[in-house]
Amino acid sequence: MTVTAAGPLLVAGIGELVATADREATLVAYGLGSCIGLAAWDPRTHAAALAHFMLPAGPAGGPPAKFVEGGFEALLERFAAIGGSVRRAEFKAAGGASMLSVMVGSLDIGRRNAEAVAARLATHGLLLAATDFGGSAGRTVQLSVADGRFHVKSVARSAVL
Amino acid sequence: MTVMPRVAAPELILAGVLATGLARAGEALAAMSGHEVTIASPDVVSCTPADVIESAGGPDCVVVGVYVGITGSLTGHALLLLPPHGARHLATILLEGILDPAPSLSAPDGSLELDPLEVSALQEVGNVTISACLNELGRFFPEPVHPTIPQAIVELAGAILDAVLLDLVAESDQLLAARTTFAINGETVDGTILILPDRRSLAALAGAVASVGS
């Protein structure tokens, strides 16, 4: 399941975001359950960014992409800082699964995370070009900076968005 | 692998409490299986979600997870995480004489497919070990601590853990986790048990444990 890449591999850990304009690079977020991996890619400048959001909203502090609220704006800032155009960008996202049917006090965080990402994009007049949300399987997502391909892998399947 | 910092007094008392529970769980599993089963005294550590995920082998590591919810005087989540081979080994021992020897794990995609009986056996392992810990923790409170029915899944460690951890970390990035290992007939199964009370329960537990320790 571990991603191997010929060029640099930038990993967005839980609550983190990564960005680069290196065309040889690959951005990856491993083991998304209820979390969301949101990718931004500019087809002209090849600027790319990937966030690993944990929750829709919460108090300030902690890692930069812990919450969609605030973390999304941090993603846009990092993306713009490396030459990405928000208006030109393709946004793709995956995750938001519901892993455990018997979980105590389940707040349906996966679904709420997916809704929060779409809503945050909408407030900026932006849309998701492709998504793979929900279900009960964990996912690893991988953004190829060279061509913007967004690979979504789970234990049982693999797809390219 | 991330080194988790050890924490002081109340957690050490808690480690002793959980060790008692896990010793009893080992006896129960030994009685069920007819094999020598021991569960090591746990390390109780204060850690971040990232630490917990790394300790399970990393976010992209496929593991067998058995989830048990915690209700009653304490609320939160508990997980037993086992590597696929270790899980099958445990299930095979528990099902000895009931199930034919397990088939090879060489599935084309490298994933593990568990027989429904194996799933049931592993859920029982999770139920026995985690319930034994909850019984011991319940001694600190006037009302008992209850486990939910267990659920076993084969998934990426990061995906299992982020589902469980997310509602615990909205207000704090620090968690309390207990980790241990199984030994069956002298062979170690490198698993992890996580007892994760929510913030309110953690405060109640710390108070109860401290009052006993003082």
Image (cartoon, helix red, strand yellow):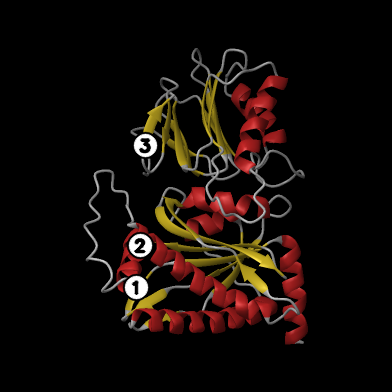
- Please tell me whether residue A136 is drawn above or below residue B33 in the rendered image: above
Mark nearer the N terminus (2 vs 1): 1
Classed neighbour count for the residue bearing mark 1: other residues with Cα under 10 Å, few (<14), some (14–19), many (≥20):
many
Would residue A140 be seen by someone viewing this image from the given angle? yes
Q: Please, is residue A128 above or below residue A99 in the view? A: above
Front: mark 2 or 3: 2
- Marks 3 and 1 belong to one chain: no
Q: Quadrant of residue A77?
A: top right
Give B157 or A112, whichever is nearer the viewer: A112
> Up-down: is B103 above or below B108?
below
Disc 2 marks which amino acid?
A: Leu
The disc placed on residue A142 is: none
Amino acid type at mark 1: Leu
Residue found at x 63% / y 56%: A104
Disc 1: which residue = B94
Q: Which mark is residue B117?
A: 2
Q: Which mark is residue A157?
A: 3
Callout 1: SS: helix
Which class describes the residues within 10 Å of circle 3: few (<14), some (14-19), or many (20+)? Answer: few
Q: Disc 2 versus disc 1: distance between alpha carbons?
A: 10 Å
The residue under the point 73% across, 66% down is B201
Q: Is residue A54 visible?
A: no
A111 horizontally vs B60: left or right: right
Q: Name the residue located 22 percent from the left edge and 51 percent from the top edge.
A: B106
Q: Are marks 2 and 3 in contact (CB under 8 Å)?
A: no
Q: Quadrant of the C terminus of chain A?
A: top left
Question: What residue type is disc 3 on?
Answer: Arg
Quadrant where the N terminus of chain A lies?
A: top left
